[in-house]
Amino acid sequence: MNQQFKVGDTVRVRRAYPPGHVRAPYFSRGKTGIVDEIAGAYRNPEELAYGRYDGEALPLYRVLFRQADLWPDYDGSAADTTIVDVYENWLEPAEGGQG
Amino acid sequence: MTGPDTHPHDHGHNHDHHDDHDHARTFQPDIEDSPFSHYQVMAEALGEVLIEKGVITADELRRQLEWLDSRSPEAGARLIARAWTEPDFKEKLLEDVNAAAESMGMDAGDIPIRAIENTPDVHNVIVCTLCSCYPRGLIGLPPDWYKSREYRSRTVREPRKVLAEFGTVIPEDVEVRVHDSTADLRYLVLPMRPEGTEGMDADALAELVTRDCMVGVSLPKSPGD
């Protein structure tokens, strides 16, 4: 499997809002996190939803976000986190800082 | 309301059924009495097309539904309890839940399931914000609340409040980690073994492992609960 990112990389979920069957949760778009794990490669569900089966399997990442980065007014502990499973087509490289 | 034991009819006599208000009051709608939603119609139509085209048979569809309905949290509880008592098995479970389940004669299904371990520093909770992904093969069908918009939206937004509503208050110095299971994997929380269970064997421990603690909204029962 050829994946673009490795564990520990800082990545950003693309800030994109295409129509149709989309598997990147809305709240994660444009948010920056860290690759926690590479969870294999799977057929792109956004294609599968329309009965298109070709194309290579897409790497799936477990991306760790700080809750404070997802929700600026988050009022739980500063250590709280959310891990979202995001396919590679939704990720782009980002700078080390949080945003 | 009159209960069945105090049913007022004397079925021996010739009473007027038009005046049978007691039956009217106990009327319960059949499932077909309310209109199907758009998505129910679509699901029915998809099933019919797959059968008509010979992709699956009606019996295969029925069998799969029967399999899903037969799953229960008991299977997951047995895995957790064994992981608590056997370090080797715990390692195996953390590595590959489906294989660990199979080694105990259980069928966890084809979708890969991960075990996520609670520690003194991290409490994990599972949600699927985009739909209702759930490790059905090991803990059965998801409860209605797991599929509700409230749970799906609030668990990522304010997990500590949601957990508190389930009676689970996580100390501030413990990280709450939400897992949004929206893709090809399913998650099962491996809770910490409760205190005071040192002498208990895996069968007794399995009784303490509830569905909700494997979703992460709760903690295992204590012995004697």
Image (cartoon, coloured by chain):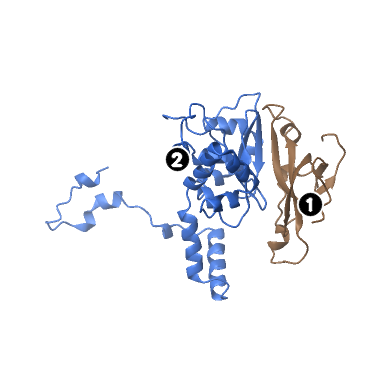
Chain colours: A brown, B blue
> Visible in this render: residue B133?
no
- Mark nearest the camera among 1 and 2 is 2
Residue B70, x across and y down, in percent: 45, 54
Question: Who's the residue at 81% across and 43% down the image?
Answer: A12
| Image side of residue A4 versus residue A76, left or right | right
Asked whether, in this view, residue A51 is left or right of residue B84, the answer is: right
> Where B65 sits versus B174, above or below?
below
Which numbered marker is on residue B203?
A: 2
Identify the residue at horizontal 82%, vertical 52% (top origin).
A3
Q: Quadrant of residue B12?
A: bottom left
Of residues B26 and B165, the one nearer the viewer is: B165
Subunit of mark 2?
A: B
Quadrant where the N terminus of chain B sits is top left
In the image shown, does B172 or A15 lie closer to the viewer?
Answer: B172
- Confirm or deny contact between disc 1 and disc 2 (CB under 8 A): no
Q: Residue at x 51, y 66 (%)?
A: B61
- Front-most of B202 and B173? B202
State how far apart marks 1 and 2 are (Cα). Answer: 42 Å
Residue type, mark 2 in image: Asp
Q: Decide: is B37 above or below A86.
A: below
Residue at position x 67%, y 51% in the image: B183
Residue A94, percent across and down? 86, 41
Crowding around mark 2 (Cα neighbors within 10 Å: few <14, some 14 to 19, many 20+) is few
> Of the residues shown, which amino acid type is indicated by label 1?
Glu
Which mark identifies residue A88? Answer: 1
> For residue B5, which numbered disc appears in the image?
none
Q: Is residue B45 above or below residue B14?
A: below
